């Protein structure tokens, strides 16, 4: 997997007003943390972080913190978005070691056009990512799931996937993708006839009641 460079500044003032001012200037606050080491508050330019946020692939980040002599490999572990603007407002970077396995969420990519769809079936894509555990060098950018041979009624589960040097977590019986029969549409004409048949006795009953009231008068 390719490593992409990212430059960051250290944050010394963690006050809310300073953080808001930094966001207005286009800097996103974040934290870099590593096993058995104190976390470091950082900030990066929003445009520099975008390639790691708006992507369907896992990427290893070569992080260079201003004032530090040594760069550190890491991954984007978490990111928070503003509920109104949907823009990133905070992120977490997790340092990784080349000799230690790591758990990471990897997106799933469906490959091919199923036979079942050509026959009228519908794709149900249930799981869009999976947690895997492996050495950093073996982290897949995404997990390809071949679906071209799937007919109507076929499904692919977590237990069906095998990736060399990668352990896939999750319930083996959980469905990733399935091809299901098309939904059956209701016939409008039949429904209308049913409504008319139901409504008719109400009209008759109402007329009989009016006649009885007239006789009493």
Image (spheres, rainbow, N blue to C red):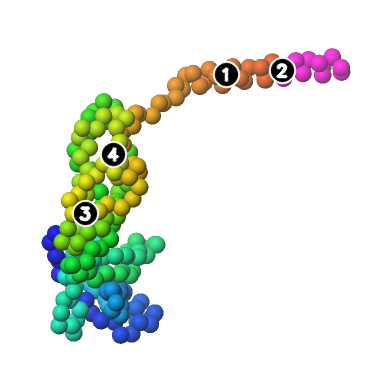
Q: Quadrant of the N terminus?
A: bottom left
Spatial CA distance of label 2 from label 4 is 57 Å
Packing grade of label 1 (10 A; few <14, some 14-19, many >=20) is few
Magenta-colored span: 206-217
Mark identifier at residue 156: 4
Q: Secondary structure at mark 1?
A: helix
Q: Nearer the viewer, mark 1 or mark 4?
A: 4
Q: Please report contact status of discs 3 and 1: CB closer than 8 Å, yes or no.
A: no
Q: Which residue is mark 2?
A: 205
Q: Nearer the viewer, residue 37 or 110?
A: 37
Q: Which residue sits at x=29%, y=55%?
A: 131
Q: Earlier in the sequence, mark 3 or mark 2?
A: 3
Spatial CA distance of label 3 from label 1 is 62 Å
Q: In the image, residue 13 lies at what x, y percent?
A: 33, 85
Assign the magenta stretch its main secondary structure.
helix
Q: Which residue sits at x=25%, y=53%?
A: 167
Q: Which residue is mark 1?
A: 196
Packing grade of label 2 (10 A; few <14, some 14-19, many >=20) is few
Q: Which residue sits at x=35%, y=64%?
A: 81
Q: Please report contact status of discs 2 and 4: CB closer than 8 Å, yes or no.
A: no
Q: Earlier in the sequence, mark 1 or mark 2?
A: 1
Q: Secondary structure at mark 4?
A: strand
Q: Nearer the viewer, residue 178 or 84?
A: 178
Packing grade of label 4 (10 A; few <14, some 14-19, many >=20) is some
Q: Which residue is mark 3?
A: 166
Q: Secondary structure at mark 2?
A: helix
Q: In the image, residue 169 lies at what x, y percent?
A: 31, 52
């Amino acid at each position: 997997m390719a490593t992409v460079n990212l430059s960051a500044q250290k944050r010394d003032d963690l006050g809310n007003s300073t953080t808001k001012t930094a966001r207005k200037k286009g800097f996103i606050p974040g934290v870099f943390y590593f096993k058995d080491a104190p976390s470091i508050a950082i900030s990066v330019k929003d445009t520099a972080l975008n390639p790691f946020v708006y992507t369907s692939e896992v990427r290893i980040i070569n992080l260079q913190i201003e004032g530090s002599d040594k760069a550190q490999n890491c991954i984007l572990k978490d990111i928070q978005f503003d509920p109104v603007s949907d823009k990133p407002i905070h992120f977490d970077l997790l340092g990784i070691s080349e000799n230690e396995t790591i758990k990471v969420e990897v997106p799933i990519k469906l490959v091919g056009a199923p036979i079942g769809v050509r026959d009228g079936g519908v794709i149900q894509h249930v799981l869009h990512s999976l947690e895997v555990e492996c050495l950093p060098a073996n982290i897949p950018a995404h997990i390809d799931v071949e679906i071209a041979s799937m007919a109507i009624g076929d499904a692919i589960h977590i237990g069906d996937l095998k990736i060399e040097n990668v352990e896939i977590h999750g319930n083996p019986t959980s469905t990733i993708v399935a091809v299901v029969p098309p939904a059956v549409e209701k016939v409008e004409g039949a429904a209308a006839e049913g409504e008319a048949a139901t409504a008719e006795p109400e009209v008759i009953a109402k007329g009989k009641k009016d006649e009885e009231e007239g006789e009493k008068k």
